[in-house]
Structures are given as structure tokens and as C-alpha cells.
């Protein structure tokens, strides 16, 4: 920490590198907490709980922290391989029904919400669910 003088008061200025490292560490810990919260009732290979080393990998944590909802939804639909023609969209509109894949995505995001995962982390957690539990390849 360095000090600076502001009028007659001496104020400590924080080291921006230290504060940034502190924030990144906090966010990584928060992402890992939400991984544990979401995957606590999910099983991995052989019906065993997911190892923390898998859940907390740098790749998975980065994906959760760096995926926004718009990019994440594009990735979800690429992963599950759903594309509709203009005619199919019109058909759904005329029927007033949601396609099954849309219902699935909504239900998964709702599950994240029920488990207390904030929307900022939900799409990344959902991507990890697709990757780990349903063995889809990340886009």
C-alpha cells in the first residue's frame, strides 16, 4: 500500500495489482462454490460423486466465469445440435408451443435458480452440466 495526501488527510492507496488478484481469487472461489452447490446431487462415472478436481479445473472455472448469457445460449444450442428453419419457427408460432429443446433449456436454468445459483453463473454451470453429465462436447 502507498499513501497519498488529500488536503490535510493522509489516505492509503490500494495496490491495484493486489486488489485485482484478490478479486480474481474471490471469483474463482465463488465459481467453485456454485459448482459444488449444483453438482452435489449429480453423479459422475460409475455413479460416484463428481471429483472436485474435475469440477474445479481451471478450464471449467474459466468457462463459468467468462460465459455471458448470450454467448452461452449460442453454445448450448450448438452443443445440443438444434437448428430450425424459418418454416419450423413459423410452425411453432402458429401452434403457440415451445419446442422441446427450449423447454429443456428453460428447465435447466430453472434448476440452477432453485439451487440458488445466480443468473450470472447459471449458463456456465448449465454448459458444464451438458459437458460432464450428458457428455456433449463444448462448442
Image (cartoon, rainbow, N blue to C red):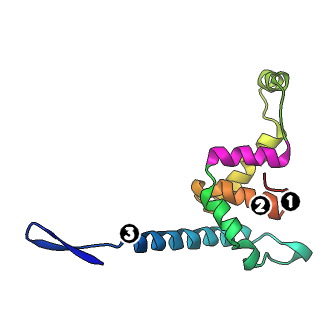
Magenta region, residue range: 69-81
Answer whether residue 79 is visible to the viewer in this image. yes
| Mark 1 vs 3: CB contact within 8 A | no
Please check the rendered image and state whether residue 103 is part of the magenta-colored stretch, yes or no. no
Q: Position of residue 22 (x, y in %)?
A: 46, 74
Q: Position of residue 10 (x, y in %)?
A: 15, 74
Dividing the picture into quadrants, the one containing residue 70 is top right
Q: Residue at x 69, y 52 (%)?
A: 109
Tell which tag, 1 or 3, sits nearer the viewer: 3
Would you say 106 lies left or right of 46 here? left
Please check the rendered image and state whether residue 73 is part of the magenta-colored stretch, yes or no. yes
First in residue order: circle 1 vs circle 3: 3
Q: Residue at x 83, y 63 (%)?
A: 133
Q: Position of residue 100 (x, y in %)?
A: 83, 40
The residue under label 1 is: 134
Q: For the stretch drawn in magenta, what is the main secondary structure?
A: helix
Would you say 59 lies left or right of 10 here? right
The residue under label 2 is: 129
Amino acid at each position: 500500500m502507498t499513501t497519498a495526501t488529500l488536503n490535510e488527510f493522509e489516505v492509503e492507496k490500494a495496490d491495484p495489482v493486489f486488489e485485482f488478484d484478490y478479486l480474481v481469487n474471490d471469483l474463482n472461489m465463488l465459481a467453485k462454490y456454485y459448482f459444488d452447490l449444483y453438482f452435489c446431487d449429480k453423479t459422475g462415472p460409475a455413479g460416484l460423486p463428481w471429483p472436485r478436481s474435475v469440477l474445479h479445473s481451471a478450464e471449467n472455472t474459466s468457462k463459468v466465469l467468462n460465459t455471458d448469457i448470450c454467448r452461452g445460449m449460442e453454445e448450448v444450442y450448438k452443443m445440443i445440435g438444434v437448428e430450425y428453419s424459418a418454416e419450423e419457427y413459423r410452425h411453432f408460432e402458429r401452434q403457440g408451443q415451445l419446442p422441446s429443446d427450449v423447454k429443456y433449456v428453460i428447465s435447466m436454468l430453472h434448476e440452477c435458480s432453485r439451487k440458488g445459483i445466480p443468473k450470472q453463473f447459471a449458463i456456465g454451470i448449465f454448459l458444464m452440466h451438458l459437458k460432464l453429465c450428458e457428455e456433449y462436447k463444448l462448442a
